[in-house]
Amino acid sequence: MNYIEPHGHMVSRTTDDYERMALAGCQAICEPAFWAGFDRASADGFYDYFRQITEYEPKRAAKFGIKHFCWLCINPKEAEDTKLAEEVIALIPQFIDKPGVLGIGEIGLNKNSRNELKIFEQHVQVAQDHDQLVLIHTPHLEDKLKGTRLIVEALKNFPKIKPERVIIDHVEEHTIDHVLDHGFWAGITLYPESKCTPNRAIDMLEHRHAERIWMNSACDWGISDPLAVPKTMQAMRHRGWTPEMIQRVAWDNPRAFMGQCEKFTL
Amino acid sequence: MPDWTPPTPVNLVDLGFMDSRSKLIDLAAFLDRVQRAGQDGDFRVQALKNALTLLSQDKPQRAKDVLLSFSDPSTEPIAQATMQGAIGAFKA
């Protein structure tokens, strides 16, 4: 069965991973801008990174018949340096009209600091000014609950940002209801150890009837699995899911959300 | 979007018991290990022990409550981020 990987950091994956994902049925990969595992020294590093995810990575994916899309931002882990962050945000408009760019992301919070919140709001302003979709990263582990609440509160100050054009990612059992009940989309990340297992993801999907939810592997340079989505689809089969409902989560839902951007075509 | 179609009922105990049993024994062994090493006073170990008490409740929201027990309950942004990673349990 075909599927969409709506959140994968392919710059940190091998070409073999592209091949394995293609063999598993992946038709499209969407790559949010993220932290490189180290702090970049200047905005020039981001200029090159934006070129990489808007120009080079789509060509690499195309060799395996996979369409590649991306999102632009500076990750909240680097937002404490507000001067650097503002220089990077200033770069975004010159890339925003590139063919594969779907919106602003993955913005959000990391340690829930004032500077992170300030830079998050500046990104949302860019999204509002350019009528872009928004993909939001929520903090890790003990910081997730507070960060999710701060993000939802901050978005209330942007009346032109419609909740149905925002996805709040990395939800878990203690944050999913807050996100969905405010009208946003929710992303479940299938990430060993620190985020969500296939069975927990399926529990949440059943609890919320798969409403406005996508699932992703967020595969990056950390311990992660680029085949986490098809493995979860297999677990859904074991748990009695119909093919139609599996397709809804793995294909229809991400397509419905990202299809709000006219550049997302399959 | 199509309406929600519930999954066909399956035996979830058959599917998940052995995996859960294994994880529980692993957790027990971890608690034994850190106690023998005199490290069970660590706040993260205490957070685990506190979370374990939530497993015997009767409502089917144990995962949510465990996650809440590990979470920072405050509501205001902090002045400055002094680290980039997370630990896994909130330290007051």
Image: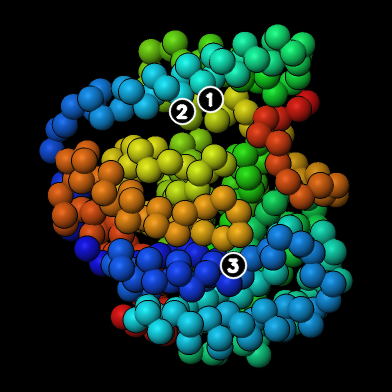
Neighbours of disc 3 within 10 Å: few (<14), some (14-19), many (20+) = few
At x 48%, y 73%, the residue is: A15
Q: Percent position (x, y) of residue A42?
A: 83, 76
Q: Percent position (x, y) of residue A187?
A: 45, 54
Is residue B15 shown left or right of residue A262?
Answer: left
State whether residue B30 appears in this view. yes
Cβ–Cβ under 8 Å for marks 2 and 1: yes
At x 48%, y 30%, the residue is: B64
Cβ–Cβ under 8 Å for marks 1 and 3: no
Neighbours of disc 1 within 10 Å: few (<14), some (14-19), many (20+) = many
Name the residue tied to disc 2.
B63
- Tell me which amino acid carries mark 3: Ser
Figure quadrant of residue A98:
bottom right
Name the residue tied to disc 3.
A12
Q: Percent position (x, y) of residue A2?
A: 26, 67
Is residue A264 shown left or right of residue A124?
Answer: left
Which mark is drawn over residue B66? 1
- Tell me which amino acid carries mark 1: Val
Q: How far, Cα to Cα, is label 2 from label 1?
A: 5 Å
Q: Is residue A258 above or below residue A185?
A: below
Q: Nearer the viewer, residue A58 or A76?
A: A58
